[in-house]
Amino acid sequence: MRSRERAEILLRKAAQDEFTVLKLIPDPASPDEVIGFHAQQAVEKMLKAVLSFKSVLYRRTHDLVELMDLVRENGITFPEIVEESRRLGPFATTLRYDDLFAEPEEPFDRSWALECIRRTRAWAESVVGLQER
């Protein structure tokens, strides 16, 4: 599979997570952990899309910091909001089982999570060149 094709698939998959977040946010009964999980997944897939497009190999991981480090190490710049998205990292693992392991360090801001997704998508699409089509 070519780099651009893989990147486009990852961006489509990220859009599915974004769709889920959009549907869940207005419902106060929607658990923050579920919204946070899908927000984290969207950002993760967008980072992997950029790495794929740039032909940068990455291991199977949910670690946003590791993925951001790879982006940075390969000379790809990204906006501050992408850096801030590292706060979503625990939603991929630890906070999925929060009753057993951990409490979030601060209250979850649903609108921030959505903004993080939207701005990360805009950045990723600009790198991959989808906004030019």
Image (cartoon, helix red, strand yellow):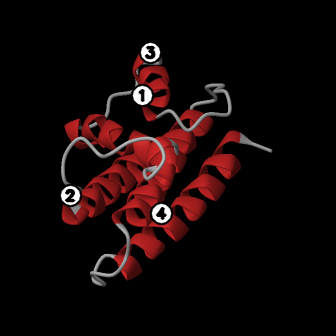
Q: Residues within 10 Å of mark 1 (few under 14, many from 20)?
A: some
The residue most toward the right is: 1
What is the x, y in percent for residue 86? 34, 37
Q: Nearer the viewer, mark 4 or mark 1?
A: 1
* Distance CA(mark 3)–CA(mark 2): 26 Å
Q: Is residue 22 above or below residue 103?
A: below
Q: Nearer the viewer, mark 4 or mark 2?
A: 2
Q: Residue at x 38, y 70 (%)?
A: 31
Task: Report the amino acid beneath label 3.
Answer: Glu
The label shown at residue 73 is 3
The label shown at residue 133 is 4
Q: Quadrant of the N terminus?
A: top right
Task: Report the amino acid beneath label 2.
Answer: Trp
* Distance CA(mark 4)–CA(mark 3): 28 Å
What is the x, y in percent for residue 83? 28, 34
In the rendered structure, which disc, 4 or 2, sits on the residue that comes first in sequence? 2
Q: Is residue 64 above or below residue 103?
A: above
Task: Report the amino acid beneath label 1.
Answer: Val
Image quarter for residue 26? bottom left
Apparent side of residue 129 relative to residue 8 in the rendered image (left or right):
left
Q: Residue at x 49, y 29 (%)?
A: 67
Task: Looking at the picture, tell me which residue is in the foreground, 83 or 108.
Answer: 108
Task: Report the amino acid beneath label 4.
Answer: Arg
